Amino acid sequence: MISRRLNESPVHVTLIDPDKQPPGRAAEMAVQAEDGGTHILLIGGTTGVDAQKLGATLCAVKEVSDLPMVIFPASSTSISCHADAIFFMSLLNSRDVRYVVREAARASLELSRSGMEIIPVGYLVFEPGMLVGRIGDVDLIARDDIRTAQEYAKATELFGMGFCYLEGGSGVSEPIPSGMISAVREVIDIPIILGGGISDAAKAEEAVRAGADIIVTGTMVERETDIEGAVRDTVSGMVRGWKDRRTN
């Protein structure tokens, strides 16, 4: 799903947290994001997302949008037949084995029978980490600790995971620095997903130019009154960064 699109352009992903608004509002947000040019809807959150909320949001969004819907799981119970795919994630720098592998293992048999596309993702959380850093008991990677980030990213690739997700934390004021993204890009060939702090087109452009392939925006969509316009500007910035990266 994602890999095919990356042959043509960078990928913009809109994150919708079922715990932040009722299903009807989530559907409205999805339509506006789709009109703005987002490519994929990521449904999930760190806390408060039970199976009922997840399923209700997926059903509401599915009624109004044909975009692929991917689950962003909080636990092994974050499974729904209404989604197209799921991030099968390992929070590699968590101190808690539950988030490194145990939740994934608990979900594995059900997922294998679900018919959903399984997308293996190595998830790395950087300072300040915000809520996911606290909930996930994360040994946060410092924003200037290039060696540690490269080691975790390379381990992600060597484990055979398809994507490396660099997360600064939902609601963080600034994204992971472009120098850090470039350093990670130097040591891996798999696509880089970037989340946290992408609040405008300029930041999206810089991140993609540095080496990010997929940009996830969630807080921006929650706060914006003009979701369509904000997503459109962000996607345009990503395309500019992609073209610069390909020509330099």
Image (tube, grey):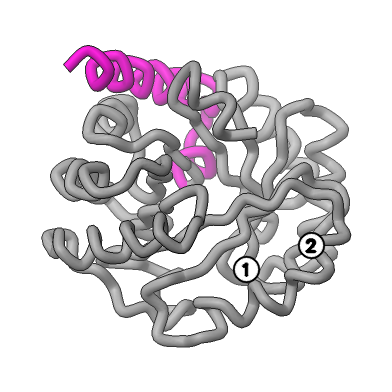
**Residue 20 seen in the figure:** no
Q: Earlier in the sequence, mark 1 or mark 2?
A: 1
**Which of the two residues, 93 or 167, is positioned nearer the viewer here?**
93
Which of the image's four quarters has the N terminus? top right
Question: Which mark, by number, is residue 74?
Answer: 1
Q: Report the amino acid beneath label 1.
A: Ala
Question: Dot 1: within a 10 Å radius of its alpha carbon, few (fewer than 14), some, or many (20 or more) residues?
Answer: many
Residue 119, horizontal then vertical, whole percent: 62, 50
Which is the main secondary structure of the residues drawn in magenta?
A: helix
Residue named by callout 2: 111
Which of the image's four quarters has the C terminus? top left
**Residue 227 seen in the figure:** yes
The magenta-colored residue range is 219-248
Residue 238 among those drawn in magenta: yes
Report the side of 71 relative to 96 (left or right): right
Badge 2 element: helix
The quarter holding residue 101 reads bottom right
